[in-house]
Image (spheres, coloured by chain):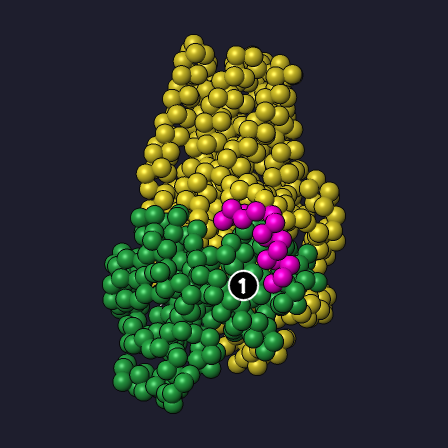
Amino acid sequence: MLMFEIRDFSKKYEGAKKYSAYKINLKVNDGEVCGLVGSNGAGKSTLIKSMTGILPYSEGTIIINGYDLRKQGVKAKKNVGYVPDDHTVYDKLTGREYVNLMGSMYGVKKRQKQAILDSLAARFNLTHALDDQISSYSHGMKQKICIIGAIIHNPKVWVLDEPMVGLDPQTMAEVMKLIREHAARGNCVVFSSHNLDVVRRVCDKIAFIVQGRLASVIDAATVRNGNFDLDAYFMELNGQWKR
Amino acid sequence: MEAVATYLRLQMKLRWGSEESDRKSRLLTAVVSVVTFMVILLLEYVLIGVLVDYFSDGLTSEQIATAFMTIVEAVLTVTAVTAQIKWLLRPADVQITARFPVSPFSMFLANLLMIYINLTIYSAALTLSMMGVLGIATGMFTFEYFLGLCAAALIGPVIPFAVSVIVAVPVMFVLNLLENHNYVKLFIFILGIVAFFVTYDYILRMMADYFIYQRISNETADLWDKLILALNSEFNPFVYAANFIFFRDVGRSLIVNAAVFAVLAGAGMTIAKPVYDRVRNRALEGKRGIFNKKTALTSDGAVSAVIKKEFKEIMRTRVYAYFYLGIAIATPVMVFFCNRLVKQVGEAQIGGSVAFGTSVLVITAFMAMINVFSANIISKEGTRFYLTKIIPVSFTAQLSIKSLMNLMVSAGALAISCFVIGVLKFVETEQIFVIVAVELVMAAGFILNGFNLNVRHPYLKNKANGDVAEINTSIMMTIGLLFSALLGGTSIVLAYDNEIKLVYYIISAVAAVYFLVNAVIFFTSAERKYNSIEP
Ligand SMILES: Nc1ncnc2c1ncn2[C@@H]1O[C@H](COP(=O)(O)OP(=O)(O)OP(=O)(O)O)[C@@H](O)[C@H]1O
Ligand SMILES: [Mg+2]
């Protein structure tokens, strides 16, 4: 079942001369994990911020679980969970308060919050810090609380912008597992990463973005099974599009 | 020395440099500052006119000028102390500057130089404009007077700077001591607000007295007389800057300036430098919250979750918590004070109807103050603004929740104020109802106006030097004071020889129109404008 679709999406920032994303088309089904790959400034965060409702856009259509993000914004947003790349949160709140707040926004009941928070905090080794104010958290701890806060409502479309940055190896493994588990429950996951190894291991499809355009989408299974060299492909793609 | 120069240049760029994307807001800031300044100059012109009219026999224009120059110097001193604390003792950019290959002493020197240069600019601007207007109002503006102003502007920063070097450290120590004494801080804060309103009220009423009844009470005249003479005393160090305006006693004035500078600045440097080093080291370590609180998970809906979050953030951000608490306590005190004053002075001279006008004046200004932060409601989210965009709650709903919270605070302060003036029978019962209705509508108008402003001019990224853009709040404050003067002034003036009912109709109409205009703008464009903000 189609969970998430982008049609002819283009985005130009206010006052910018160039498009940061241009005529992008992408479909992701339930059960699928889609990786966004591209060099710095390629437009990954732009795409992600647009599909979570953060950035306004005028060209193209973004459909989330059947709802048009522009026309039925509130309903579409109910189905999205977002982990930002700079993990800024309400740091006056404690970790537990933040997760509670995020859950309430999406109408999650106490029981479900409790279950998800308990299990994820344990997996991420964060239980001891849940009642501390977030402003005292370290880099990675903030990232962890962002991840928990974004999945607390079991979103149909889970979007993560460079989720692995700053995480210890053990947590990284947990996050990869979590992504797969979430997709397996009938949802889809879209995330960006510079770590091609992670992308290779977790994704079902990999979307390559070069200078705001979707250069190609390849099946990750072929990468894992055959002798497809992802790194070489990446270099080659970005070589072709010299600025 | 070269390091100092480089560092100085960097600091100038950081503090005065323009950011390309910021052009519009800079223009806006400039316009608002110019307009505010013009209003102040106009007020000064009028005030000087009044003074000269009344004191032409007792006091000379020179004495009035000297007194005013003292005020300019006092403003410069406060500016200097603030700059010292902000730039030297509590620098926001210490983490960045610490990486530069510049010795702490060079930075210290560069910062002091920076402050001095800044003061000189302020001094020139203030002296030329304020004292220029004074010269025109008193009719003593000549080319020679202008030359004198230039000389005074140049000498102007010397003593304020010297004073600030020595005063900044103890002031900061006191501030640090107060850090954990919330009640004392609250008390001082309330005193400050009360003082502001008493002054505001006093000057406005003096002007009204003069223009409506063409006279000034003897006590008022006496007070000003004494004040101006005191400021002309030889023991006022600022007289030695004012002297240059009239080129009197130039030699002695130069010596005094030099001596004060040498002694104070020298002593200050020896004290300030070690403190500066310690403070800097502490700032480098960074401060982290150690707040820990056990809470339970809940089954709230989105609306109550937003309300709770807003509330927690406010209570855990000291500035906001103080602000609201302070206002809530200061409001009735203020209203009581103003009305008592009116009862004493007003009834004898002007008549009882003025009590209603003063209440409107004071309460409107309060409503504006309570709600200035509504113009900051989006900027306040800063880098976490994206959260308001991803949650499945419409923007109008989110803003409406916030406006309801603001309105609740306003309603509380209003209720207490009206209770006070009602119990003490300063105004009639019927008038209390009018006040409640008009002020609630005004409060709602202020809140929506603030939102409309902020949604068009969101400042989500703090400036490089750590300052949060506060232009929106100052615009709202200006608008608020204008409405306070408009509504209060209208009430006072019209109530004098008109049916009081007419006054009710007029101020209700003004409030209603203000509210409606802002409500229409809000409900037709807020959603769209909010959505188009690019974080
Ligand atoms: N707020 C903004 N205003 C104007 N241009 C922007 C803005 N944010 C990003 N851009 C531009 O859009 C393009 C894409 O940026 P984006 O942040 O989407 O890249 P990215 O793929 O996420 O890069 P990275 O891997 O470094 O995170 C860049 O050219 C960038 O300069
Ligand atoms: Mg990015």
Quickly name the residue at label 1.
A147
In the image, residue A201 above or below residue A85: below
Q: Is residue B273 visible?
A: no
Q: Amino acid at mark 1?
A: Ile
Residue B106 is left or right of residue B269, and the answer is left
Magenta stretch: dominant SS?
helix
| Image position, residue A129 (x, y; %) | 68, 62
Q: Is residue A115 magenta?
A: yes
Residue A19 is left or right of residue B243, and the answer is left
Q: Which chain is yellow?
A: B
Examine the image and state in which quarter residue B195 appears.
Answer: top right
**In front: B194, or A15?**
A15
Q: Residue at x 32, y 87 (%)?
A: A236
* Rendered colour, chain A: green
**In front: B187, or B384?**
B384
Q: Is residue B498 visible?
A: yes
Residue A170 is left or right of residue A151, and the answer is right
Assign the N terminus of chain A to one quadrant of the image.
bottom left
Q: Residue at x 40, y 47 (%)?
A: A74
In the image, residue B311 above or below residue B490: below
Q: Is residue B462 magenta?
A: no
Q: Residue at x 45, y 27 (%)?
A: B441
Magenta region, residue range: A104-120
As drawn, the residue found furthest toward the top would be B499
Residue at disc 1, secondary structure: helix
Marked residue chain, label 1: A
Answer few, some or many: residues within 10 Å of disc 1's Cα (few below 14, many 20 plus, some between 14 and 19).
Answer: many
| Image position, residue B55 (x, y; %) | 53, 30
| Image position, residue B407 (x, y; %) | 51, 33
Q: Residue at x 45, y 68 (%)?
A: A161
**In front: B224, or B384?**
B384
